[in-house]
Image: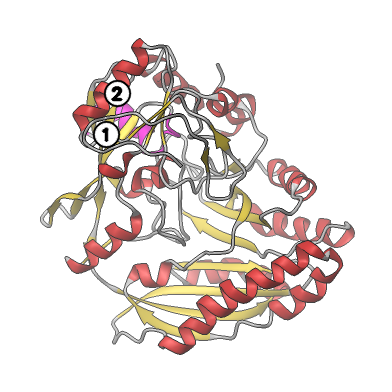
Amino acid sequence: MATATPGTAGKSRPAAWRNWAGNVTATPARVVTPASVGELQETVRRAAEDGLRVKAVGTGHSFTAAAATDGVLVRPQALAGIRSVDRTAGTVTVEAGTALKDLNRALAREGLSLTNMGDIMEQTVSGATSTGTHGTGRDSASLAAQIRGLELVTADGRLLTCSEKENPEVFAAARLGIGALGIVTALTFAVEPLFLLTAREEPMGFERVTAEFEEHFAENEHFEFYWFPHTGNCNTKRNNRSQGPAAPTGAVSGWIEDELLSNGLFQAVNSLGRAVPATIPSIARVASRALSARTYTDIPYKVFTSPRRVRFVEMEYALPRAAVVDALRELRAMVDRSRLRISFPVEVRTAPADDITLSTASGRDSAYIAVHMYKGTPYHAYFTAAEQIFTAHGGRPHWGKMHTRDAEYFASVYPRFAEFTALRDRLDPDRVFGNDYLRRVLGA
């Protein structure tokens, strides 16, 4: 893909942009890589003058077209790095184009850590928070909920500084803004002294894990599990703070579990399943027993995150936590009575209620069900059937993952939806930051 030269706010020749999964493409008129906030402000002003729309794109890990544009594509990777660390306040301010993996490693060197994080760390901080990236947690919430301040370039090129005290109405929404309110240039996260987590990974039967779901949730700081369709098998993971000592996975055993089984072998069996779908149920029964129980203790990002090299497409819905077991059982019954062949496990996680306007956990304790299909495999029938189950429970789709919902639906499941759209009308009345995806999910 063509890129622009940092430091000049230069433009490249038009070139196709493609997301990580390869299911979304776009051909922008210009690609710009600003080297300063001032250059980004000028880029936005020029685009507005030229009648072009502007979208910032991170590493493309979203499965929706939230960042797609035929106008000016802004790549913020030159706006990267830690600006400052305030140990007294317990915060770190970081440039928007910083990759989560770089932030996590830099914080660890400073003896600091985020409280919670998602299961991959390839995304930019602004891309991850703007789409609602989350991990799992009983008490600790999504990445966006850990934001204490942010900077935002608005449609007229102004730079807004936002926090609970400064532009609080913008702060309430822009922590998870789907790129609709402006371009985030910096984020201030709450951090804490580096700590240890002990992870316990353990196979468990579907009936047991669903019957004991609330018990596992209550007893663990971070609980999640994967169900393997066409089987009654699950793999559970419980992460809790530990006094130590550190006991990381061994080099060989870690490689076997995380690379050979979870990536290398998983890639091979998915390729076989795509070529010969009839083999998938048998493969699932074998694959669901391949991972054994293990316990290890390490610093947070090494426990929360894992390498994900097998490419897929994904749909994920946030449900009221009390509804998740019923919904998962309905999903299993649907798969069992259908002719679908599903080679990817279904992931279940949790999050406490937060106060972000369009967070999937806004105002309610939530649990997430994520369904996946291997890249290149037909997914429409599976995702459509799953979505019918999720929406029947008042589900809210992840903003960066596949769904078919529109503004009318979101107005019914987000009590503060009109608050967000009114703010958008004020900050971007001409839809400088608009695109087809935002038109569908937020309205014209």
- 280 vs 200, left or right, is right
Q: Amino acid at mark 2?
A: Thr
Q: Is residue 166 visible?
A: no
Q: Amino acid at mark 1?
A: Pro
Q: Is residue 6 visible?
A: yes
Q: Viewer-proximal residue, 82 or 9?
A: 9
- Where is residue 318? Give x, y as percent: 58, 48
Mark 2, secondary structure of its residue: helix
The extreme front residue here reads 13
Q: Using the image, determine if residue 227 lies above or below residue 128.
A: below
Pointer 1: what residue?
34
Q: Is residue 6 magenta?
A: no
Q: Residue at x 47, y 28 (%)?
A: 28
- Where is residue 381? Give x, y as percent: 80, 47
Pointer 2: what residue?
43
Q: Are marks 1 and 2 in contact (CB under 8 Å)?
A: yes
- Where is residue 235? Give x, y as percent: 61, 75
Residues shaded magenta: 165-179
